[in-house]
C-alpha cells in the first residue's frame, strides 16, 4: 500500500500544488485527495482499446495506471454495440448530414429557467423538430399538445410525442413534428410540486 501510494505521489510531483502541500506538512493521502479534485490526470490515462492486458494499449509497462474499468469500457466494445455512446454519435452525425434543419434551422429555447431540462425547437421552412433532454438523474413528468415521431433517442422504448408522459434520467430524444405548426403550449412540464409550467410561442415571435 505504501509503495503504491508513493508511486502515485512520484507520478504527480510535477504538479506544483503537490510539492507545496507536501512541504507544508500535509500527508500523502491528504495531498492526493486534494489533487484529485482539480487534476486532469483522470482524462490522461492510456487509451482503452480492448479488454486485453493493459487495455490493449501496450505490451510493456504503461506510463500511467490503466483505469480498472477497461474491461467494460473500451473502444472495441463501443464500436461493436448498437446501444453504445459511439453508435449514438454516429446516428447523430448521420442526422446532421441528412437533414439541413440541424445546421440551418432556427433555434428557440423553451423553459429557459428549468435547471434540469433542456428543451428547444428547430425550424426550417415547414419542417420543425422538438428536442427534449433531461440532464438529471431524476424523472420528470412531461406532456405535449402536439404529435410527433421519434427520430432518435438514447432509450430504445421512447414513445411518440403524444404518448410521452415522462422523461427518464438523462433521456434525450428528437421528435419530428408533422409540419410547422403554431407552437402554442407546445409542452407542459410538471415540477416536483406538480405546478404546470407552460411555454407559449406566438406565431411570428423571434426564434433567435
Image: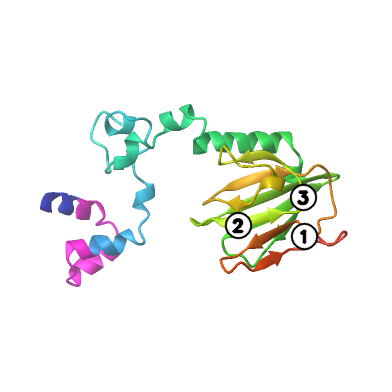
Q: Looking at the image, which is closer to me, 59 or 184? A: 184
Q: Is residue 165 visible?
A: yes
Image side of residue 151 versus residue 48, left or right:
right
Q: Earlier in the sequence, mark 3 or mark 2?
A: 2
* 108 is higher (above) or lower (below) than 72: below
* 13 is higher (above) or lower (below) than 61: below
Quickly name the residue at label 3.
146
Q: State the residue lying farthest toward the left.
A: 2
Magenta region: which residues? 8-30
Crowd band around label 2 with a 10 angstrom C-alpha radius: few (<14), some (14–19), many (20+): some
Judged by its main secondary structure, the magenta piece is helix
Q: Is residue 57 visible?
A: no
Image side of residue 77 versus residue 143, left or right:
left
Whether tag 3 and tag 2 are in contact, CB under 8 A, the answer is no
Q: Looking at the image, which is closer to me, 14 or 8? A: 8
For marks 3 and 1, give the CA distance: 9 Å
Quickly name the residue at label 2.
141
**Which quadrant of the view contains residue 101?**
top right
Locate residue 130, reporting x and y percent.
72, 49
> Is 36 colored magenta in this rendering?
no
Amino acid at each position: 500500500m505504501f509503495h503504491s501510494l508513493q508511486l502515485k505521489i512520484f507520478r504527480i510531483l510535477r504538479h506544483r500544488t503537490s510539492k507545496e502541500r507536501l512541504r507544508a506538512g500535509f500527508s500523502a493521502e491528504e495531498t492526493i485527495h486534494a489533487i484529485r479534485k482539480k487534476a486532469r490526470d483522470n482524462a490522461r490515462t492510456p487509451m482503452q482499446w480492448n479488454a486485453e492486458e493493459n487495455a490493449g494499449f501496450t505490451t510493456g509497462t504503461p506510463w500511467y495506471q490503466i483505469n480498472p474499468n477497461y474491461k467494460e469500457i473500451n473502444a472495441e466494445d463501443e464500436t461493436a454495440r448498437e446501444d453504445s455512446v459511439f453508435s449514438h454519435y454516429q446516428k447523430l452525425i448521420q442526422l446532421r448530414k441528412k437533414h439541413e434543419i440541424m445546421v440551418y434551422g432556427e433555434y428557440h429555447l423553451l423553459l429557459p429557467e428549468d435547471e434540469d431540462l433542456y428543451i428547444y425547437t428547430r425550424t426550417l421552412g415547414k419542417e420543425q423538430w422538438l428536442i427534449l433532454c433531461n440532464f438529471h438523474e431524476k424523472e420528470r413528468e412531461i406532456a405535449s399538445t402536439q404529435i410527433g415521431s421519434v427520430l432518435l433517442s438514447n432509450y430504445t422504448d421512447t414513445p411518440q410525442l403524444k404518448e410521452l408522459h415522462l422523461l427518464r434520467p438523462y433521456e434525450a430524444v428528437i421528435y419530428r413534428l408533422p409540419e410547422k405548426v403554431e407552437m402554442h403550449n407546445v409542452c407542459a412540464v410538471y415540477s416536483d410540486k406538480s405546478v404546470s409550467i407552460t411555454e407559449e410561442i406566438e406565431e411570428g415571435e423571434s426564434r433567435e
